[in-house]
Image: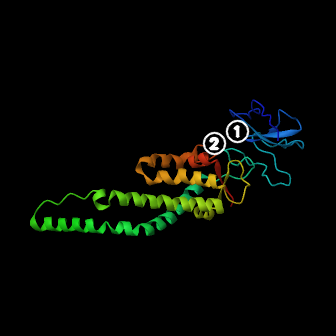
Amino acid sequence: MSDDIPVGSPPAPPGRHAAPSGWYPDPVDSRTERYWDGWQWSRNTRPFNGPVRQPSQPAGYPAPVPGGAWPRNQPTQTPSGQANFTEDRVPLARWGWRLLAVVVDTVLVGIVVTLLSIPIYLRMLGPFRDYISKILEAARTGQPPPAAPSTTELLSATDQLLAALIAIAVGMVYHVLFLRLRQATPGKLVCGLLVVPADQGQVRGGLPWRMAIVRAAVWVIPGQSAIFYLLRLVDGLFPLWHRKRQALHDVAAGTQVVKLR
């Protein structure tokens, strides 16, 4: 691997404003190819073993890997410029699969949080019972119905904070442990997805602790406060337009989500 990163980009294929990601002749060393990520040259190089395209193959499509493992007519980018693959040629997950995995994980985490929070929510029964009694008494005497109790009257600020802390703790433990041990949450495993370090789609064996913790924190914590719901929404939609299909928590942790099956 060379430490010299050239300036400039490969020639743009017809009709494109920039060359798609892929392997191109290395401007630094004619004996090698260098990976162009669609935005800039990377430090990754490989030996150049002759022509990389068949004459009939359109520009913008990668060369097959020796042994036929790489499809000849599979583009490296979508028409919008998003990458289809990691730098080491592992397919990236589509947004729909990621959404389905989030739904599955949300249901599983919600079940655990609800069970652990039952003692807290049971304390709401007393104030709620009193409110119902006041409504019935007002109806019996012909008085206007009482005002509905506020959230704080039903559940104290301390209990609300405790419920939020339980949700954060369960979410963090769930995401961090599964990412560290299995490299995917149960929802992602069901959908055939795997979380990998950015542009290292072939890495297996679990994410490093720091990467797993950062990724989980950026995703889990904003979801526990209405103040940050907009941030959570942007985070979830971010892969739809990000060049490498990363969500905000992927960008923060340096990860990508790949599709294995």
For image coordinates 58% across by 62% down, the residue present is 187
For image coordinates 68% across by 48% down, the residue present is 198
Q: Is residue 35 above or below residue 142?
A: above
The x, y position of residue 2, in whole percent, is 82, 38
210 relative position to 23: left or right: left
Q: Label 1: which residue?
A: 38
15 relative position to 240: left or right: right
1 or 2: tag closer to the N-terminus: 1
234 relative position to 38: left or right: left
Quick one: 75 or 258, which is closer to the camera?
A: 258
The x, y position of residue 247, in whole percent, is 58, 48
Circle 2 — which element?
loop
Quarter holding the C terminus is: bottom right
Quick one: 183 or 40, which is closer to the camera?
A: 183
Tally of numbered tags:
2
Using a 10 Å C-alpha cutoff, classify the residue at mark 2 as few (fewer than 14 neighbours), some (14 to 19) or many (20 or more): some
- Is mark 1 in CB contact (under 8 Å) with mark 2? yes
| The quarter of the displayed image where residue 146 is located | bottom left
The x, y position of residue 32, in whole percent, is 86, 39
For image coordinates 65% across by 45% down, the residue present is 244
- Amino acid marked by disc 1: Gly
- Amino acid marked by disc 2: Arg
196 relative position to 132: left or right: right
Rounded to the nearest angstrom, the CA distance separating label 1 from label 2 is 9 Å
Q: Label 2: which residue?
A: 243
For image coordinates 80% across by 37% down, the residue present is 3
Q: Is residue 192 visible?
A: no
